[in-house]
Amino acid sequence: SNNNNNDNVYTYHVYSHVLFLLTYLKCLLSLFN
């Protein structure tokens, strides 16, 4: 159960990080366009 909880926190952290990167890339692309 504890491992499952840690996996969820890790997945959430990765997901939010990826979302941030995608938003950042989208902003960069809009600057260049």
Image (spheres, rainbow, N blue to C red):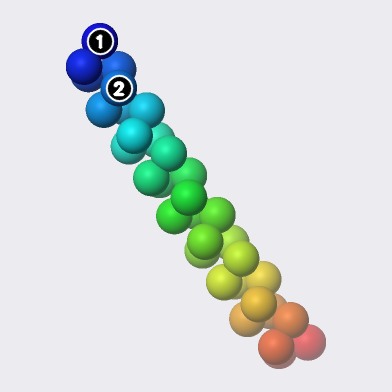
Residue named by callout 1: 1
> From the image, which quarter does the N terminus lie in?
top left
Identify residue for label 2.
Answer: 5
Image coordinates of residue 29 in percent, x first then y, are 69, 79
Where is residue 15? Give x, y as percent: 48, 44
Question: Which three-letter amino acid code belongs to the residue tagged 2?
Answer: Asn
Residue ID at (43%, 39%): 12
* Farthest-out residue, bottom: 32
Q: Is residue 33 above or below residue 24?
A: below
> Is disc 2 in contact with disc 1, using a CB cutoff of under 8 Å?
yes
Of 29 and 23, the residue lying toward us: 23
Which residue sits at x=30%, y=17%?
A: 4
Residue lying at 61% horizontally and 65% vertically, measured from the top left: 23
Which numbered dot is residue 19? none
Cα–Cα span, label 2 and label 1: 6 Å
Rendered location of residue 17, percent (x, y)? 44, 55
Mark 1 nearby-residue class (10 Å; few <14, some 14–19, many ≥20):
few
Position above or below: 8 against 19: above
Left or right, residue 19 beside residue 5 = right
Quadrant into which the C terminus falls = bottom right
